[in-house]
Image (cartoon, grey):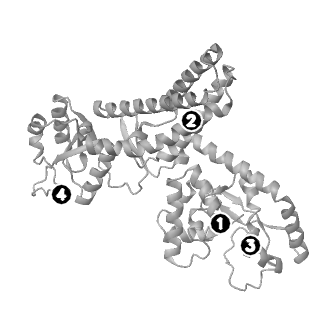
Amino acid sequence: MNSKNRFIFTNLLAFEYILLNLVLILYLYFGILDFSLNDPELLKNILWLWIIYNISWLFIILHVRDNQFYFDPDYGFLRSLLISMFFFIGVVTVLMIGFQLTYFAPLTYILPIVIFSYLNLISHKYLLKFLKKRGSHLFSNTLLVSSGHKSDNLSEFEKAMNQYGYNLVGYLDDKNEPIENVLNLKIFGKLMDLSKVLTAYTIDEVFIDMSHLEEEKIKTAIEIADNYGVRVKLIPENPLLIARNYKADAIGELAIFRLRQSPLDHFNKTIIKRMFDFCFALFIMILFAPIYLLISLLVVLDSKGPVFYSPYRKGEGGKTFKCYKFRTMHLCDNPINGTKSTVEDDPRITRIGKILRKTDLDEIPQFLNVVRGDMSVIGPRPHRINLQNDFRKSVNNYMVRSYIKPGITGWAQVNGWRGPTDTQEQKKERVNHDLWYIENWSFWLDLKIIFLTLFGRHRTKAF
């Protein structure tokens, strides 16, 4: 973070602290009208409350919230503030109990946090925009060196940089053909003009596009920038980056890109999803226990055969597992190498099987798969082995679905891409929705999918 961005960051933090203390002062002022200010115990508790609030918010800033929150409007103000609010309430409650400050009722110290979070949400939504319009000089003046990208990519790059607190003032290009003024920027020229530009203009950072520059020219540009005390950021050549979610990292002295990054690559988020899956599935199994028993009895009475049909499916990392369903047919296909799909008015379907399939109740035994850890509540639907082989041949990136556990319901299903996969469009759209879910997972997204599964227009399997 350069000095200008640090200045903005510091001022935004100061604004938050002023807002926090103003809310606390006003709330306590109107809340203690019925108390005597001559009560030393009251004054002591007010002082402790003020200290706990400020220390707790400092903890939230340092350990819960990411700096990116203050510069990237796409980061998710609402989500970040909700998480911060819950942590804020938790930390304050623990400290209040730890210091045995029982003078005030819990609502007295929780409600100001809710008020502060709401005002913080509103203020942050407009404050940074106001600073960008009225104080563009506060943002880092940035020079882009040797852009080999297309004009539309350059436009997107400038827009993104503006969101992160950078002010792109121009670029230098080392190509032989005439430079097109795509964005009406102030500075143009060749790489050899870098020293002149840094002398004539106040530049805080230089972004060097490595895709169309020789190694020696890159080193020269870095040396020139270093001589002027200007920070340098490198934009590496990335022709193979086909996924939006990737992460730059380093192993030893080599830079690497981690492609197809998912939030579930982080251990703490994997634990959150697994805990939710286990608790939710166990709750459903206990709640629906009488229905499980009733359906099992009806399946046995309706036709000869086992209660469950347990076909083999492919799960996370290509692992094979038994996927439990209530049996809905007289003669079930081979559970290992089955290839037959059901058709309309399929004679194999039993009377009770028709009802189970229509209501999706044949799928609810899969909550046992979730408890066992073979499946998740939300994720890509598991396919038959032969169907998976078909998808692999016809849809690119299909096997990326195996990065995570398959689910009882998923993003593709609630968006209408369920059922038949006869056409190439059906296959492609289902896979694309599954990949989007993997790269954009959040706990809130899982809750949304559960809600849409139950009440959405494209009500889907299962529960």
Q: Is residue 357 above or below residue 111?
A: below
Mark 4 crowdedness (10 Å alpha carbons): few <14, some 14-19, many ≥20: few
Q: Quadrant of residue 350?
A: bottom right
Residue 303 at least partly seen: no
Residue at label 4?
A: 182
- Who's the residue at 31% across and 34% down the image? 5
Residue 3: x and y in percent read: 29, 30
Residue at label 1?
A: 455
Q: CA distance from mark 3 to mark 2?
A: 44 Å
Disc 1 or disc 4, which is closer to the eye?
1
Q: Is residue 48 above or below residue 278?
A: above
Element at label 3: helix
Image disc number at residue 113: 2
Mark sitting earlier along the chain (3/4): 4
Mark sitting earlier along the chain (1/3): 3
Residue at label 3?
A: 359
